[in-house]
Image (cartoon, coloured by chain):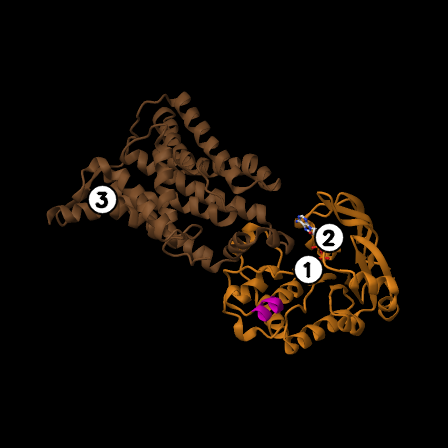
Chain colours: A brown, B orange
Amino acid sequence: MEIFTQLALNSLIAGATYSLVALGFNLVFGTTRFLNMGHGAVASVGGYMVLALARNGHLPFTVSVFLAVLAAGLLGWLIDRLVYAPLRTRRASSSVLVITSLGVLIVLQSLLAIIFTSQFWTLAAPSVWFATVFSIGSGNITGLQLTLILASVLIFSGGWLVLRFSDFGKQVRAVGDDEEVARIIGVPSERVIGGTVFWGSAVAGLAGVLVGLDTGVYPTMGLLLLLSAATASIIGGLGSVTGALLGAYLLGFVENFGIWFIPSGWKTAISFGVLVIFLLFRPHGILNKEK
Amino acid sequence: MAILQTHNLSKHFGGVHALDRLSIQLKPGQITGIIGPNGSGKSTLVNVLTGIYPSDSGAVILGGEQLKTIRSPEVRDYGLTRTFQEVRLFEQIPALDNILVALTERGVFRALFERHKILHQTRAREILERVGLWEKRRALARELSYGQRKLLEIGRALAMDPKIILFDEPYAGLFPEMMKQVNGILRELRTQGLAIALIEHNMDLIRELADHVIVLDGGELLAEGPPAEVLARREVIEAYLGE
Ligand SMILES: Nc1ncnc2c1ncn2[C@@H]1O[C@H](COP(=O)(O)OP(=O)(O)OP(=O)(O)O)[C@@H](O)[C@H]1O
Ligand SMILES: [Mg+2]
């Protein structure tokens, strides 16, 4: 039973990471109806920015993190303006957008490899608290990992409140339901999409920073982050923020408890197994109603 | 006099001439009936006028400006709005929010930090009461009945406080009770001085409501004039019988 607590903690840590990336992935899907494969790379840019600013640029750590999150948000927004928005104007199908975003993922990963080499870098956490190990029952968790879980909880509560109660939330859902009609009735749909993309990308950037601090950064980390986020979103229900949260933590638990029974080399296989099961038996996810 | 005019407006889909050098006009305080057999281009006219499709050639004269084509984000700025032949609502939000989102035009930042004022809430309530849906304000759009959905869409058009409304078959499939409600709304809007286009297949309704009738056939203007006169013309009767 001792391992149980540790596995539960590991599940929460994984779930928190996935949720932060899945948020933006699902927000973008909610307003534009396409699976944005480039999203994972935007997350990794967050981590690399801290590497560049704090480690190589000697900026204070907190300033670097702030700038990294902002940079990820702006990058996501810029890609949307320069690449996806013109495609939307030309009524490109969502498969065209998906393929394009795959290109964006590859380009960003290559750029990271060119600038930072394909080496694995660990980000140094300057605060003692981050490295402090706390014992909960028979399990251990670091301050950094607690921060990750806390960030996930806070960001999702905030996001839920904004979508539920602000008029911006109404605009987001109106655009998600029928972008064309939203435009006709005067909702600035492109700005609404831009706003959600910035928000989702900034949060993904934060995830990139925290993952970088926890395990390190490498150019292809974006793909792994993306796959987990996409799986979490599909399981939970595409386009729904609560769905992203549920799916992410469910995936975290299944992966971590799965390796109780199966060798840990199979971890990724487990998550794809779950994905396939959902695609076969509940393709619209936990939360979405069947169309 | 006219608030909206088209001049030789054309739109084709492949080989189909959905609109063929069409010149029409809408006047304030008038209901203009638009009739014509299925596929004659009535909905296409509304779609081109609201930026769903760009036109191929011709012009639209709106608020004194001559435009080559209308882009959908600008539709509201011209005081123009519409309903759809197949109702298009924001399905995942409540009826009340469907009205509120159309009530004010605001940017992302204002929408994020500023909530609707009492004034807006009151106006939204007035509109929902006008279309008989105040009791249903909390229901999601997708949970409403067919007729309620049509009325909610009309309510959303009213919420924009437009000068011109293009109604694409607002009566289709409604029970008599709801038809009366729509009737009342259209008359009221005319009294308020709005320019109204009414696409409708029911000739009794056209006779009853329209001040002016436009007949389309194959995307072209077949006839126009006062309803009693136009509906009696042989070519108009033949166009309908011929379908
Ligand atoms: N998006 C489209 N793509 C291809 N063809 C179209 C499109 N929209 C309309 N059409 C064609 O244009 C012509 C005019 O169609 P439209 O919908 O305007 O007719 P309508 O007068 O509204 O008919 P109805 O009374 O059946 O609603 C038809 O031949 C139709 O098939
Ligand atoms: Mg039609």
| Furthest residue in direction left, as rendered | A1
Please tell me which residue lies in front, B113 or B219. B219
Q: Residues within 10 Å of mark 3 (few under 14, many from 20)?
A: many
Residue B150 x/y as whole percent: 62, 67
Q: Tell me the quarter of the image containing the C terminus of chain B.
A: bottom right
Residue A274 x/y as whole percent: 30, 46
Circle 2 residue: B49
Q: Is residue B190 left or right of residue B123?
A: right
SS of the residue under disc 1? strand
Please tell me which residue lies in front, A163 or B82. B82
The chief SS type of the magenta part is helix
Q: Is residue A73 above or below residue B104?
A: above
Q: How much space separates mark 2 and mark 1, taking CA atoms? A: 9 Å
Q: Which mark is residue A256?
A: 3
Q: How much space separates mark 3 and mark 2, taking CA atoms? A: 56 Å
Q: How much space separates mark 1 and mark 3, taking CA atoms? A: 53 Å
- 2 or 1: tag closer to the N-terminus: 2
At label 1, the amino acid type is Arg
Task: Evaluate if marks 2 and 1 touch, with contact meaning CB atoms under 8 Å apart.
Answer: yes
* First to last magenta residue range: B146-152
Q: How crowded is mark 2: few (under 14 residues within 10 Å), some or many (20 or more)?
A: many
Q: Please tell me in which quadrant of the rendered image residue B89 appears.
A: bottom right
Residue B205 lies in magenta, yes or no? no
Q: Tell me the quarter of the image containing the N terminus of chain B.
A: bottom right
Circle 1 residue: B82
At label 3, the amino acid type is Asn
Q: Mark 1 lies on which chain?
A: B
